Image (tube, rainbow, N blue to C red):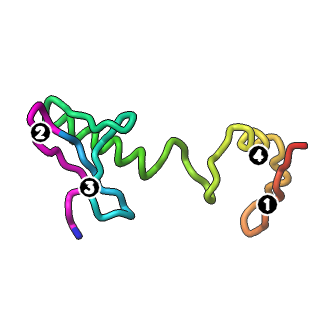
């Protein structure tokens, strides 16, 4: 259970970066356009593996209630505060028509 989540695997011309996904048991290589990348040092491979693992787990945006937070919705929340009452009350959905 307490296994490393990233590793650098020695190859003939460098190091291959690999990481483990949360929902899969196997190791996955860091790829660019479907091609596994080689790095000069083990440290660079570990950093690339950490970055790829974080990008896979957290994606490109911050999630809120399963939806990607958009700038338009945030602007609507600021503009129409009165439709988003305080604690314990259900907010009214702002819909642009």
CA–CA distance in space, label 3 to label 1: 43 Å
Q: Nearer the viewer, residue 23 or 70?
A: 23
Mark number for residue 27? 3
Badge nearest the viewer, 3 or 4: 3
Which residue is disc 2 drawn over? 11
Residue 26 horizontal/vertical position (percent): 28, 60
The answer to whether the residues at label 3 and label 1 have Cβ atoms under 8 Å apart is: no
First in residue order: circle 3 vs circle 2: 2
Which residue is disc 4 drawn over? 77
Q: Residue at x 19, y 49 (%)?
A: 7
Mark number for residue 91? 1
The answer to whether the residues at label 3 and label 2 have Cβ atoms under 8 Å apart is: no
Provide the secondary structure element on which disc 1 rests. loop
CA–CA distance in space, label 4 to label 2: 52 Å
Residue 35 horizontal/vertical position (percent): 32, 36
CA–CA distance in space, label 3 to label 4: 42 Å
Badge nearest the viewer, 1 or 2: 2
56 relative to 1, above or below: above
Segment tinted magenta in the rendering: 2-15
User: Callout 1: few (<14), some (14-19), or many (20+) C-alpha neighbours within 10 Å?
Assistant: few
First in residue order: circle 4 vs circle 1: 4
Location of residue 2 (image quadrant): bottom left
The answer to whether the residues at label 3 and label 4 have Cβ atoms under 8 Å apart is: no
């Amino acid at each position: 259970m307490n296994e490393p989540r990233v590793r650098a695997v020695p190859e003939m011309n460098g190091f291959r970066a690999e990481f483990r996904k949360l929902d899969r048991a196997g190791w996955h290589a860091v790829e660019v356009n479907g091609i596994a990348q080689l790095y000069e040092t083990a440290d660079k491979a570990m950093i690339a593996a950490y970055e790829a693992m974080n990008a896979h787990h957290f994606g490109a945006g911050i999630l809120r209630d399963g939806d990607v937070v958009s700038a338009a919705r945030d602007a609507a929340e600021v503009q129409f505060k009165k439709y988003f009452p305080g604690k314990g009350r259900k907010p009214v959905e702002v819909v642009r028509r």
